[in-house]
Image (cartoon, helix red, strand yellow):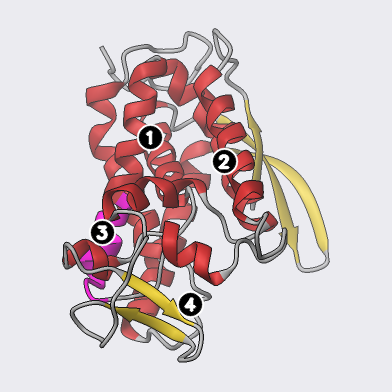
Amino acid sequence: MFPLKDDIPTRRTPVVTIALIVANVVIFFLSIRNGGSIWSGPDAQTVVHYGVIPYEVTHPGDECEIAAQAGRILCEGRDPVRVFDTPPTWLTVLSSMFMHGGLLHIGGNMLFLWVFGNNVEDAMGRVRFVVFYVLGGVAAMALQTAVGPSATVPSIGASGAVAAVLGGYLLIYPRARVLTLVFLFVFFTFIQIPAMFFLVIWFGQQLLFGYLDYVDPTGGGGGVAYFAHIGGFVFGLLAIRAFARYRNPNYGGPRYPVY
């Protein structure tokens, strides 16, 4: 299922949402200028340098680097390697939110951010939305790191921060109608479904795939950081009361008490 738009018009231009989308797109193209491709994203060295690596988070001061000859990622404090000239770990937590592994990856994330982000921004105001978005991405990576504290596979993408937006939207506008593109094998159709239905199904998928990936890490998880999605979504559910301040009068369903 792919969301296309909801039925709640915003009261003002979603400047932050648009700026985040532009920033993600610009950084995506900058990240592939010296290697990689539009379909596969940046090359391995760029991903290791600017993606967030759980091992680096849980082992402060120990940096990781990809060894071309060994064909794997080596980390200080664990492997006989000395790493130089890599960004500090705190910076990779932020930079990883603006990098993507290909056109489909960034396209999906930005579609979800546009459909759901504009009304969440409207409910919070621009400054609060920026803080909420960044903290959502940090919370997402915190859970991903907690699940695999010694993992050396770098994570990139805005999915965790976008998941926080989805969690917040679910509580603010559960009965908003979302125009959705649904694929049924070789056929597709457009239907309007309640946001609660769409988002609960999406979150349920993350829980299921995350569990399967956890019990069988080699079972073909496809390199998706499902626990980052879960962490971001749960953050959105828990933090929305502290950030949302406005109720859109165009929403016809039961209103979340943001005041």
Amino acid at dot 2? Asn
Disc 2, SS: helix
Amino acid at dot 3? Leu
The residue tagged 1 is 133
Which is more N-terminal, label 4 or label 3?
Answer: 3
The residue tagged 2 is 24
Label 1 crowd (10 A; few <14 / some 14-19 / many >=20): many
On screen, residue 57 versus residue 102, left or right, reads left
Task: Tell me where residue 230 appears, x and y as whole percent.
Answer: 34, 56
On screen, residue 24 versus residue 187, left or right, reads left
| Residues at marks 2 and 4, CA–CA distance in whole angstroms | 24 Å
Amino acid at dot 4? Gly
The residue tagged 4 is 221
Task: Tell me where residue 204 appears, x and y as whole percent.
Answer: 42, 59
Amino acid at dot 1? Tyr
Which is more N-terminal, label 1 or label 4?
Answer: 1
